Amino acid sequence: MPTILHISDLHFGPPYMAEVGDALATTATTLAPDLIVASGDFTQRAKRQQFADARVFLDRLPDVPIICTPGNHDVPLYRIWERLSRPHELYCKHIEHHLDHALHFEGVSVVSLDSTAPRRSISNGRIKLGQLEFCERAFSESPPGNLRILTAHHHFAPAPDYERDQVMPKARRALDRLVGMRVDLILGGHLHRAYIGNSLDVYRGADPEHGIIIVQSGTSTSRRGRGREREKNTMNLLYLDRNMIDITHFLYFDEPHRFEPVSRHRFPRPGHPFVEIGDR
């Protein structure tokens, strides 16, 4: 089963911190993941040079498949005609050609959905019914036994703290559909602080016996961290095996100028309801 590096909210432009980006690239090489998920906001203002810089950074990461999804900062905000007529043109040119796409990898199937809504909801995002149908088709092609992972920039469930974030419109509808597809994990960003838990923490759902493990990354390379991660940078490393999902949360430290693990979260893989003593 693969190891997945999860980063988010790089924000190339004025908020990007080059020294943190260097540390992230170095740490990523050391960790040697099999797969990388980058969950949106590659730029601060969707400018051509910001996308070009983000592409250079992505090319510095280990030479493994990278699953990308756009964030709300990756569509023009103030260039209104461009936002309405061709909002993802620069993103598709520099980062990823497809907005909704799927990858079936050894042991995992990852579906990436574009949660940006340039014409309707600039900040909070949206997942459309057609995208859920795409997701359903993609997972129906998943090899038996593969872990099912969804990534989108915006969050389906709020972090259970005091920041009071608004989730996407009709997020609960989407969660119910995703539970029905037996999605195991959702990886996202946008909150600029980490949250690692379960959808049942905040929403009982239509099927309260089955939740989805939710893994949010804070901002990995910008100074825009919020809440308990104010002016901090984080990322996650996921170890997947036959029985367990093991998530290590990393925080950047100025000294010794690198990302270090600060917490670990362990979940039984769906279908294995208990954490076995002695499991890694």
Image: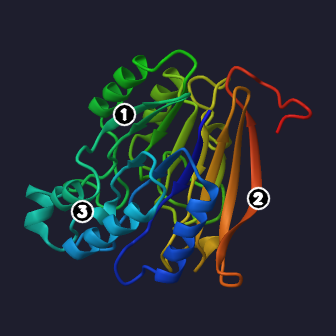
Position of residue 64 relative to residue 104, above or below, is: below
First reached walking from the N terminus: tag 1 or tag 2: 1
Q: Secondary structure at mark 1?
A: strand
Position of residue 7 relative to residue 257, above or below, is: above
The amino acid marked with disc number 3 is: Val
**Residue drawn at 87 percent across, 29 percent down:** 276
Task: Pick the residue in front: 22 or 271.
Answer: 22
The amino acid marked with disc number 2 is: Ser
Residue occupied by mark 3: 75
First reached walking from the N terminus: tag 3 or tag 2: 3
**Residue drawn at 60 percent across, 22 percent down:** 207
Cα distance, mark 3 to mark 1?
22 Å
Quarter in which the C terminus is drawn: top right
Please state which of the two labelled residues, at mark 3 or mark 1, is closer to the viewer. 1
Residue 100 lies, in percent from the top left, at 30, 39
Residue occupied by mark 2: 263
**Residue drawn at 34 percent across, 46 percent down:** 126
Quarter in which the N terminus is drawn: top right
Cα distance, mark 1 to mark 2?
30 Å
Task: Pick the residue in front: 111 or 76.
Answer: 111
Q: Secondary structure at mark 2?
A: strand
Task: Pick the residue in front: 272 or 125.
Answer: 272
Left or right position of 167 against 263: left
Tell me how many marks there are.
3
Residue 99 lies, in percent from the top left, at 27, 45
Residue occupied by mark 1: 102
